[in-house]
Each structure stands twice: as structure tokens, then as C-alpha cells.
Image: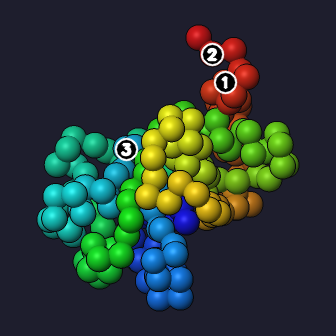
Amino acid sequence: VYIPCGMGDAPAGLCFGLKLVFRDAVRVYTAEPVMAPAMPLALGTKRYHQISTRELGLNPQNTVADELAVTKISGPSCFVMRELLDGCVTASDDQILAMLATIYDVEELRLEPSGVCGLAAFADLMRSNISLKAPQGTHIVWISSGGLLPGNVWQRFYDKGKKWAPGAQNA
């Protein structure tokens, strides 16, 4: 299961519930924009909620996935995730916008950039043949809507994503 991660509270609750019910039969990964990798930074350094992505010179406000643009993870989330999370994946803004455009073109779903972050990261993992802990099985990606985005804002995201979508003629 790939869950978009901002402050980490919702993903921590979902991770806890999934592990409680499915135990070792489920693997949970957080998905974040490359410019805001708060969860992998927190868990990787073991500084948890005491480290900020700004210490790496990253400015999360520079990502299109604004709902996931945080500098650090909450303390309670770190407590849960350090024991239960199987991994973290990231996606660039170009990957996120390409996925947003592709999903609209294929399924006519108008999604927000933050909502497709997990799907973009998962697609990149599959393309690059990186071995996950659970390569076999059912992969579930948590997505969210873009229904509250103003039409002109969503259209700009879509237009930019079309340049990066599979089959586009990129320079």
C-alpha cells in the first residue's frame, strides 16, 4: 500500500490499522515529493521529528504537491512509523504532473498533484525494476481528488504534465 505522506499522522494511522489487521501480509510505503522527503529523512537519520528537510537545503514550498509540502514529520507519527513502515518512495514534480495528465487522459479523473504522488512514485519504481519487499501481490495506491482546485490551476498542472506524459515529445 502506497500512502501519500505530509505530516505523517494519517499515514501512521492507516499503517497501524493495516498492520493490525493484515500483519506480515501487508507492506506499507509512504509517498512524498522529492522536494519534501520528510519521512525518509526522519526515519533514516533517527532524528525523527527533530530534523527538517530545510537542513538539506530543500524548500518544500517549491513542489506542486503542496498538501504534502512539509518540513518535518510529527512526533507521534515517527513513533508509529519507525516500527511499522516498510519503506518510503518519492516522485519528482515532473513525474507527478505526468501521472496527473495520464490519469485524466485514460480515466477522465481530475486529480490533484498531491493525490497522484504515490501513483507516480510506484510507476517509477516499476519502470526502474527496483525490487520491493513485496514484488508479488496486489499493489494499492491511495489517491485523492482534485475537485477543489480552481479549473484554471488544474488546467495549468494538466498542460505541464502533458509535456512529460508517456508518449509526449519531450526535449
Read off the residue under disc 2: 170
Tag 2–tag 3 contact (CB < 8 Å): no
- Give the amino acid type for the residue marked by disc 3 in the picture: Met
Element under label 2? Answer: loop
90 or 112, which is in the foreground? 90
* Image quadrant in which you'd find residue 82: bottom left
Q: Residues within 10 Å of mark 1 (few under 14, many from 20)?
A: some
Q: How many marks?
A: 3
Question: Going by the picture, which residue comes out furthest to the front?
Answer: 136
Residue 96 x/y as whole percent: 57, 42
Element under label 1? Answer: helix
Residue 145 x/y as whole percent: 70, 61
Quadrant occupied by the N terminus: bottom right
Q: Residues within 10 Å of mark 3 (few under 14, many from 20)?
A: many
* Image quadrant in which you'd find residue 170: top right
* Image quadrant in which you'd find residue 105: top right
Mark 1 or mark 2, which is nearer the start of the sequence?
A: 1
**Which colour assignment does the render follow?**
rainbow
Residue 101 disc label: none
Read off the residue under disc 1: 163
Residue 35 disc label: 3
- In the picture shown, does residue 161 fall above or below 74? above
Residue 11 x/y as whole percent: 46, 73
